[in-house]
């Protein structure tokens, strides 16, 4: 790891995230999957149909398919962050720590949702900036157990010296995730179509839903790894 006096770069966060992922990915995935992969699979099976046009993105659809899964995935990120901060911990203790930190984290997320959404809708850049400055709330919630407003202030304080580095990392990550998601969704759909043509329609539908769900789980884990690495460096 670079010295704390070395200016933090977006590539440093990316490399730190990758190193954290490699450290114990199987364990992270096992802990996160019930709150990411299974939730996505459940929504695909029992939830509303995925919208195909902008007009179909109603507030109810956004709440069910985007907001609620994001809130649940936050629990998984808290557990993964605990495992990274406490190297000798166990999945059970990670889930206990996540449960203890979750109320404050969730309230902080709700409090920050309106200004972030307003910034994204207005000029996009303000929303991205706010999101980047609050990127550390997951590890702070686990490590420092602060109330919601203090949690937001702490993330804002820690990211102050590297605000635009965090913005650059976030933008590059979003672009990568979009490409990753499109590729994964295409692969899943292709495999599902082949299986359907071969007469395995149920299996094809399952695979078409499974591949994007796995990618969603990986993205959630990676986000927790990146924010936790950056927190350790900046704190």
Image: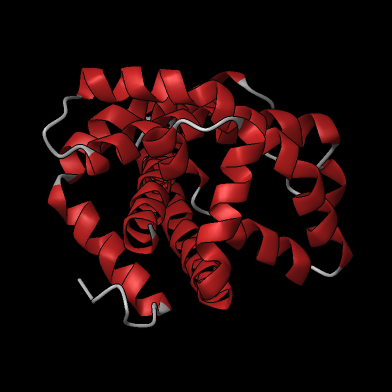
Examine the image and state in which quarter residue 139 appears.
top left
Q: Position of residue 117 (x, y in %)?
A: 79, 51
Q: Viewer-proximal residue, 13 or 54?
A: 13
Specify whether 184 is left or right of 102.
left
Image position of 137 (left or right of 31): right
Residue name at image x 42 percent, y 18 percent? 99
**Residue 40 visible in the picture:** no
Residue at image x 52%, y 69%?
A: 166
Viewer-proximal residue among 203 and 64: 64
**At 59% across and 30% down in the image, what residue appears?**
147
Q: Residue at x 26, y 37 (%)?
A: 29
In the foreground, 37 or 135: 135
Where residue 131 appears, x then y in whole percent? Answer: 63, 57
Q: Is residue 157 above or below residue 162?
A: above
**In the image: residue 150, left or right of residue 2:** right
Q: Nearer the viewer, residue 77 or 58?
A: 77
Q: Is residue 51 above or below residue 43?
A: below
Residue 136 spot, x, y in % from top left: 49, 51
């Amino acid at each position: 790891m670079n010295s704390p006096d070395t200016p933090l770069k977006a590539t440093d966060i990316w490399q730190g995230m990758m190193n954290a992922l490699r450290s114990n990915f199987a364990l992270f995935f096992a802990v996160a999957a019930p709150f990411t992969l299974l939730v996505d699979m459940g929504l695909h099976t029992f939830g509303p149909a995925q919208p195909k046009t902008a007009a179909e993105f109603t507030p109810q659809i956004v709440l069910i398919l985007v907001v609620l899964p994001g809130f649940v995935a936050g629990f998984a990120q808290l557990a993964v962050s605990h495992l990274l901060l406490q190297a000798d911990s166990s999945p059970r203790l990670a889930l206990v720590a996540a449960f203890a930190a979750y109320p404050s984290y969730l309230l902080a997320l709700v409090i920050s949702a309106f200004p972030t959404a307003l910034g994204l809708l207005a000029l996009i850049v303000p929303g991205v900036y706010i999101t980047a400055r609050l990127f550390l709330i997951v590890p702070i919630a686990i490590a420092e157990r602060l109330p919601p407003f203090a949690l937001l202030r702490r993330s804002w304080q820690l990211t102050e010296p590297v605000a635009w580095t965090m913005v650059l990392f976030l933008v590059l990550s979003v672009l990568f995730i979009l490409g990753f998601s499109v590729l994964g969704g295409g692969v899943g759909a292709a495999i599902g179509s082949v299986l359907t043509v071969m007469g395995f329609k149920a299996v094809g539908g399952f695979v078409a839903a499974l591949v994007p769900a796995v990618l969603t789980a990986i993205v959630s884990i990676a986000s927790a790894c990146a924010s936790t690495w950056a927190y350790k460096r900046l704190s």
